[in-house]
Amino acid sequence: MSKKKDELNQRDTIDNTKKAPLTTNQGLPVSEDEFSLKAGERGPTLMEDFHFREKMTHFDHERIPERVVHARGFGFHGEFEVYESLEKYTKAKFLTEPGKKTPVFVRFSTVAGSRGSMDIPRDVRGFATKFYTEEGNYDLVGNNMPVFFMQDAIKFPDFVHAVKPEPHNEMPQAASAHNTFWDYVSMNTESAHMVMWLMSDRAIPRSFNMMEGFGVHTFRLVNAEGKSHFVKFHWKPKDGMHSVLWDEAQIINGKNIDFNRQTMWENVEKGIPAEFELGLQIIPEEDEFKMDFDILDPTKLWPEEDVPVQIVGKMTLNQNVDNVFAETEQVAFHPGSVVPGIDFTNDPLLQGRLFSYTDTQLIRLGGPNFHQLPINRPLCPFSNNQRDGYGQMSIHKGQTSYHINQMNDNQPEPASAEDGGYEHYHEKVEGRKVQARSDSFKDHFSQAKLFLNSLSKHEKQHLYDAFSFELGKCDMEIRNQVISELINYIDRDLTEYVADKVGAELPDEVNESTYEKSSPALSMTNTNFSLNTRTVGVIIMPDVAETTLKETKHKLEEQGLQPTFISDKIYHIGDITLGATFDTVHSVLFDSLIVISGEKPLPAPAIENLEIAYKHKKAIGFGTDSVNIFDSLSFSQNDPGITDIEQDFDGFLNDVKGHRVWER
Ligand code: HDD
């Protein structure tokens, strides 16, 4: 158990699983909780009923404002461990003492949807990590995409207003496929690169443990000698990056709106953690101007082939929260929460974020003491002269609440950076006050093209289809505008495909980016492949032998796969009780399907599940005596990814591990 979880358990947890007397908030025992106090059995309720009023008032105030973005999130506790000391680059203690375990809390989120929206919209995913270090909390508030929609934070409210449901009718929920989003991005072409990521498979991740995380901005690491290096932070998932198909995502969102949170919550309950390695890309300060873009521009990534990602540590998320409101909802992140050895750059997006996050917590969490909420409280001691405000949880003794006083010998301690105090990096800055942007930020399209150049065939097709889907939901004027002002500057082939698909005008002029480089690391085909957390829906007919069931279950579980047996109703076969029916689950909720049919012909729902699994390019296995199933299916046993599991179990495993059978 992480130290933070221990602390929460010891200091703050109230165990409501144990029987306890019911009292009011004042501790008064309550013996009647079903009937309010009335003047006569059929009479009106009386004001005097303090228990009724207290209970109702609490209920009436039980909601806090949801986050203005990233409202839908899910959190996990865990630990981070650095592999080797990074003292060459930073003095941050949690990065310089190998073997030391730093407790973390991670909140994954979608961005545009409201709190009750679905888990797999086409959207960016938030990946925010709070490290409870001995030098204070460090928040790495990142996303699952390495770039962003804008270069200057002043545009953030405009962008968010454009992507959120439109204000006149509050539609569509959790979707960028509408006029205002596409109007915004075509008028703000610095978003071109990020739009490519949003239209790619990265926007529909299979699960939280199968996506990357990025700090996005260029930050600084500063070592004990005061030397600084530029750094980009990466989280690399041990299970690799994998996504569902868009058609599949849309069905999942209906069949199980909680798909991502539920699968990871269940894995953690079973003792299967999610693991991510921390990677750093480092550029020495003297090389600041060596790239063909400005490293302060948050719409640019550093190709991994040019600046390799050094793997420096591992994060293991292995504990669920006990209470979603108290932990996941009340957690407050802030990119400005740093520790000695980590500092900022002049990235204008980062600079704006440094204001926004504390500001938003003030309204969301109701006042300046939100840092005292159990999930936000540092594990190390904290003390200063800020005393009052809503919700002060402590009683500070003593007469002085101002700095440098003689009465309590109250001085800042440690007295200097050498003694461990935070010191801002002594960067030299000078310039005129201007509302302007450097010319070095003006190339909006080269990296959009770099991303496209780097995709595999099927990834590219998904991106083409995503653009066509999204623009197909917009008015014709917007389609024309996006095609002529945005896509036409990225790639002509994409422009022609989408224009044709959505019936828009094809611009005569070819303006595409001529950028030729590609970065293989950007393709999800070059990721890790693993059977860990993979699921199999096993469709069975009731006449199947108990031994066959047991053997199949054993064989699958031995490989770390998670089988769910599915039939038309819940059968008890020997000591196995089937887990699901065609009414409660669907092939979209599994990575693969197996059919063990016995003698009986396949019922219609089984056929539907298999056809859809085939369409979604999933591995499909069958038992030797089930070959007759192909009489009722549109595909054959010789198609790629269709395997007789008695003859070639390893082949089936390989296909599951491969995530999808793309050549089908
Ligand atoms: Fe932000 C939340 C990530 C730009 C303003 N942001 C928020 C969360 C994540 C990010 C993961 C959810 C944290 C949680 O789970 O509680 N945001 C990013 C990234 C950005 C980014 C990676 C670009 C690199 N954000 C950004 C800008 C601004 C904000 C430019 C405003 C100037 N973000 C906010 C916010 C939120 C937020 C409004 C809403 C809830 C919160 O902060 O705590 O202040």
Image: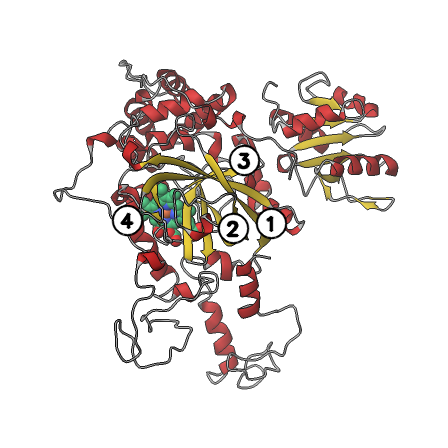
Q: Nearer the viewer, residue 396 or 117?
A: 396
The answer to whether mark 3 is within 8 Å of ligand 1 is: no
Report the mark closest to the observer, 3 or 4: 4
In this view of the protein, can residue 169 be seen by the observer?
no
Q: Position of residue 448 (x, y in %)?
A: 36, 26
Q: Decide if ligand 1 comes within 8 Å of the CB at mark 4.
A: no
**Numbered badge on residue 425:** 4
Q: SS at mark 2?
A: strand
Amino acid bearing label 1: Trp
Which numbered disc flags the more N-terminal residue, 4 or 1? 1
Q: Which mark is residue 249?
A: 3
Q: Residue 468 versus residue 142: which sits nearer the camera?
A: 142
Please state if 592 lies on the left or on the right of 210 as rendered: right
Cβ–Cβ under 8 Å for marks 1 and 3 = no
Q: Which residue sits at x=33%, y=22%? A: 490
Question: Callout 3, which amino acid?
Answer: Ala
Q: Is disc 4 placed on a helix, strand or loop? A: loop
Q: Which residue in the protein does label 2 denote?
A: 74
The disc at residue 265 is 1
Q: Is residue 189 left or right of residue 20?
A: left
Whichever of labels 1 and 3 marks the residue nearer the N terminus, that label is 3
Is the C-beta separation of discs 4 and 1 under 8 Å?
no
